[in-house]
Amino acid sequence: MAVEQYRQYIKYLLSERQKRASRSRNYEEYEVQTIFDEQQDHYQLLYVGWRGNKRDFGCILHLDIKDEKIWIQHDGTEEGIANRLVEMGVPKQYIILAFHEPYVRQFTEFGS
């Protein structure tokens, strides 16, 4: 599968999640942002802003494309973005769960 197709899948999934999260926000200075760096192949979904008097900032999802594989650096979702990518047709061996230690990855059903 072409790297360009992976980019489209990732951007679609992050944008979809961003729209859902943005609809449910109740604070004026709080937003969910997507960051798409297609030249370096880094993709993030993060939240930033204020919830009442509390500053909130953090990464929900971080994916990279390296060596024609999707590297999931962080997944803070319940559903798991790897599962969504598989549903879209990405073979499991082309998805690396980078948040697992390298020696553990061989025991997952995904790439290592």
Image (cartoon, rainbow, N blue to C red):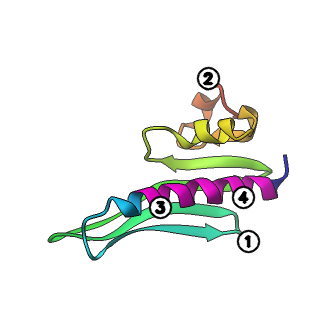
Provide the major secondary structure of the magenta segment: helix
| Front position among marks 1 and 4 | 4
Q: Is residue 69 magenta?
A: no
Marks 3 and 1: CB-CB under 8 Å? no
Q: Of circles 4 and 3, which is in front? A: 3
Q: Disc 1 on helix, strand or loop?
A: loop
Whole-Å distance between the Cαs marked 4 and 3?
18 Å
Specify which label sits upstream in the sequence, 4 or 3: 4
Q: Look at the numbered disc 2 and give the secondary structure of its residue.
A: loop
Q: Position of residue 37 (x, y in %)?
A: 65, 70
Q: Amino acid at mark 4?
A: Arg
- Amino acid at circle 3: Lys
Residue 58 showing in the rendered view:
no
Residue 7 tag number: 4
Q: Position of residue 81 (x, y in %)?
A: 56, 43
Q: Are marks 4 and 3 in contact (CB under 8 Å)?
A: no
- Camera-near label (3 vs 1) is 3
- Residue 100 drawn above or below residue 27: above
Q: Which residue position holds label 2?
A: 107
Asked if the stretch drawn in magenta spans residue 16, the answer is yes
Residue located at (69% from left, 63% from top):
41
Amino acid type at circle 1 is Gln
Q: Earlier in the sequence, mark 2 or mark 4?
A: 4
Q: Tell whether 54 sits left or right of 96.
A: left
Residue 16's x, y, as percent? 54, 56
Q: Looking at the rendered structure, which numbered label has been put on residue 19?
A: 3
Towards the viewer: 69 or 79 = 79
Q: Nearer the viewer, mark 1 or mark 2?
A: 1
Q: CA distance from mark 1 to mark 4?
A: 11 Å
Report the residue marked by disc 1: 39
